[in-house]
Image (cartoon, rainbow, N blue to C red):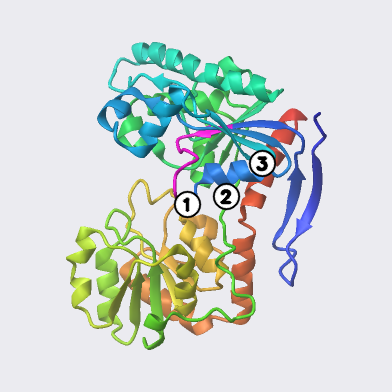
Amino acid sequence: MERDGQTCIRTVPGPLSEQLKYHFTMIEGRDFVVFGLQSWDLHIATTIKYTALEFSKKNRVLFVNPPLQRSFQILHRDLPEVRKSLKIIKKEADDLVRFNDNLWVLYPRTILESINWIKNHSLFNFFNKLNDKRFARQIKKSLEKLNFRNIILFNDNSMINGFYFKELLGPKVQVYLLRDAVTLVSYHAHHGTILEPQLINKSDIVVTNSDFFADYARKSNPNSKMIGQGCDVSLYSDPDGKMPIPSDVESISHPRIGYVGYLTTIRLDIDLLIYIAEQRPGWQLVLVGPEDQDFKNCKLHEILNVIFLGTKEPTQLPAYVKSFDVALNPQIVNPITDINYPLKIDEYLAMGKPVVATKTTFMKYFEQDTYLASTKEEYLTLIEQALKENSLEKEFRRTEVARSHSWGNFVEQIYDGIMKFETKTEI
């Protein structure tokens, strides 16, 4: 049975409540089908998994894993995930697994043909539709088994697999989440660049995690809006101040200017870090995380006030962020980083830390609560400013902003878009 959505106003408590007021929309008793590029079994936190779990708190959800691809089966037959898929396809294991009272996970009993090598787009479309028909048959079987009706189809950034699902599954509402520059990846660059605007156009609602993507989507579909990004900041919380500082940080003098995350030159500017360390020898540059080969071989290891602390468990990271006086996100600007949502900003803010980051197109979203630098010189100036003007009020504001980016709020905005579409209200 369907229930009407409910809308009210939620206000973040505290003196900043008027600034952080937002609408709260709830949809209950509906049937969602959720699919995308990532599988349920990935051992990392994923947007699609958190979104499905949030949906399932008040609705029934079928989470659909990407089917096995023929070429992947042939080239990686010994991988555990391939062996698991083949076992399910042979009916030696269940294809539909119940995760909680409202959520089921489907492992499709089919192998899709690998067609991305076909450069002729018309020919590619012909075979892609055949693949989608094969894929959709597996989903329909589960929908019938679970008695799902009037489904809401939620597509997380998958513009090739599932392109024809609106026609094949007949959802009441199709929602497309555009949250990453997938078409810049070589696999999706050719056909994805053509298909994504078409998929955006035929979706009923498009939600994005940046203004850049929202502006791009509106060129094909006016029912597009930026809803930010969900983030699990529950670990990054120290309300009573009792979280202990890690022992390998305690002996490091202040001020500590820190970064937590994968140290890779694909995303980070080594020259900028060298410049900061050399120009301010009294600052301690603390880097926490695994290093790629470029970082392992770089000059930073020769500078006395640069401290590499290595890889840590995810549960340990909040304590390292707590130990910083200023947190950095020293990104190098490229087509991916320029429009990417950096989740670590929410994690830094959740700990109340002043953040100095590279000014990118996306970071405009955080411009009220971070310090954004365009040059090496600006980095120095803004770190000094962040050190001087930090306060309890600013720390409170940062933690409240991070909390407002919870997965619950993320999904509430999706609900809001669905309700407005169904009631023919402007998004």
Q: Amino acid at mark 2?
A: Gly
In the image, is residue 42 part of the stretch drawn in magenta?
yes
Could you tell me which secondary element the residue under label 2 belongs to? Answer: loop
Q: Are marks 1 and 2 in contact (CB under 8 Å)?
A: yes
Q: Quadrant of residue 124?
A: top left
Q: Quadrant of residue 401?
A: bottom right
Cα separation, mark 2 vs mark 3, equals 17 Å
The residue to which callout 2 is attached is: 228
- Residue range (magenta): 34-44
Callout 3 environment at 10 Å: few (<14), some (14 to 19), or many (20+)? many
Q: Amino acid at mark 1?
A: Tyr
Callout 1 environment at 10 Å: few (<14), some (14 to 19), or many (20+)? many
Q: Are marks 1 and 3 in contact (CB under 8 Å)?
A: no
Image location (x, y in percent) of residue 298? 19, 67
Residue at x 68%, y 23% (from the top left corner): 172
Could you tell me which secondary element the residue under label 3 belongs to? Answer: helix
Could you tell me which secondary element the residue under label 1 belongs to? Answer: loop
Q: Could you tell which of marks 1 and 3 lies nearer the N-terminus?
A: 3
Q: Amino acid at mark 3?
A: Phe
- Name the front one of labels 2 and 3: 3
Q: Could you tell which of marks 2 and 3 lies nearer the N-terminus?
A: 3
The residue to which callout 3 is attached is: 55
Residue 226: in sight, yes or no? no
- Name the front one of labels 1 and 3: 3
In the image, is residue 257 part of the stretch drawn in magenta?
no
Query: Which label is found at residue 341?
Result: 1
Residue 129: in sight, yes or no? yes
